[in-house]
Amino acid sequence: MKAKFSSFLQHKWSQVILFSVFIAVTSSALYFSQKSVVSFLLLLGSLLVLHYMNLKKVTKWIVAAGLLFFLIPFASSGGPAYQSYMEVATMVGIYISMALGLNIVVGMAGLLDLGFVAFFAVGAYSYSIFATPQASNFMPFGQYPLGGESFWGFLIIGGICAAIAGVLIGVPVLRVKGDYLAIVTLGFGEIIRIVFNNLDRPINFTGGAMGISSVTPPKLFGIELVFPNQFYFVTLVILLFTIFAVLRLEHSKLGRSWKAVRENEIAAQAMGIPLVKTKLLAFALGATFSGMMGVVFAAKQAFIDPTSFTLMESFTILVMVVLGGMGSVPGVILGAAVVTILNLQVLTELTNWVNQLSLNGIVTIPDALSPAKMQKFIFGAILVLFALYRPKGLIPSKNKIFDASKLKVSKKTEGIENKDSVVVENEKVQV
């Protein structure tokens, strides 16, 4: 019986039927209930189920796009918790994009970066300064704040500013490696936060510790984007671009160079890989995605200050990468989603539930032990468990496997073509 059931699950169409039933049940439960966090999480979890299904990659991408663009927003819109669901989904997208950027630096290139949130801050401040009257303090020309239409241009500008910051940080950092690299990047991350904190005098660039408020919301075709369900689609488009770019980079010549540098720098250099250029590109490209999401974060929150970019944020993003699997794109996506949902949704709901029990006199738990305040302890415990029992993460990284026989055939074919071309060239020369 067990063997028949497992063979049934292995069949493609049986998987499709079960997946369709699962989607129908969870989306209906989410739409018709006033608030069902479990249904929302199960519907998001359907993307993980889809990853393991026996389908073609193109089919998986089409189904995932349908779920993300249509079904999840529609099913969430049935109750009053619509905007809170979309807020969580938007933050998940922002953190996934940042974790993918850090995965380039840490997972692929093997450069331990503990100050990655600094690039997020650079992107956020680049938009906030010009989308508020703050820029008029030091810009002698132009009218500020800029309109909401400028948001789309600042997505590129924020990414470029973060990339430049990545290169500036990467140049001196390349002289060290290992633990020393981690300490230096940690220091740079704190330096950038403190610079933003103190850059309010003698000329007020960043608002100092008070931060920058009333950031102009983005505009699209004359419509102001202010609600979480609107930012959800903006984040989703940028996230899909990030995933596509990272996947293309992973299997490119540059991606293979990063992995070679990660495994053995001396051997990579001996094979002709330029170490400085390869490492700087890892810093710059990883920072670009973080900077773009920093612009989205500033526009969504409409307020930023240096406390949004503390060292804990860098550690949290690193936890996402380690938990998911360093170097693994699907693993990092899963790790970032798990940590963000755990932080924003699960721990918050558990805290509300515990508070409700305390109010009803059923159980009394000290405020210091509420789940929301135990976030760091829970993350630490999860990391220890994964280090002991699953050191390669939730979805370990896999190298692309090539068929040796096909490679030999292709080499022979190329050799024949090259010979033909040489003959033709010789004939041309003789003529």
Image: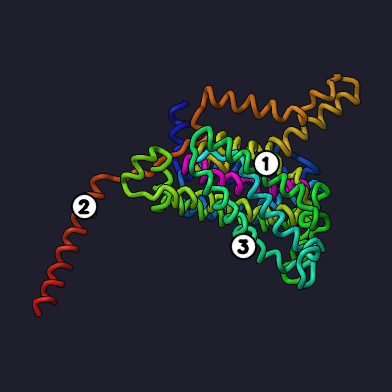
Residue 388 located left or right of residue 35? left
Task: Decide: is 275 above or below 143.
Answer: above
Say which of 189 and 299 sits in front. 189
Q: Amino acid at mark 1?
A: Glu
Determine the residue positioned at 49% across, 52% down. Answer: 281
Q: Quadrant of residue 311?
A: top right
Give the mark nearer the N terminus: 2 vs 1: 1
Which residue, given by chain and number where applicable, does mark 1 sit on? Answer: 190
* Residues shaded magenta: 84-110
Quote the CA–CA distance across marks 1 and 3: 25 Å
Say which of 183 and 259 sits in front. 183
**Front of the two marks 2 and 1:** 1
Give the mark nearer the N terminus: 1 vs 3: 3
Which residue, given by chain and number where applicable, does mark 3 sit on? Answer: 156
Say which of 255 and 361 sits in front. 255
Q: Is 88 contained in the magenta span?
A: yes
**Front of the two marks 1 and 3:** 1
Say which of 310 and 406 sits in front. 310
Query: How are the residues colored?
Result: rainbow
Task: Decide: is 364 above or below 124.
Answer: above
Quarter placement of the C terminus: bottom left
Which residue, given by chain and number where applicable, does mark 2 sit on? Answer: 409
Give the mark nearer the N terminus: 3 vs 2: 3
Across and down, in percent, residue 327 comes to 48, 41
Secondary structure type for disc 1: helix
Q: Amino acid at mark 3?
A: Ile
Answer whether residue 236 is visible to the viewer in this image: no
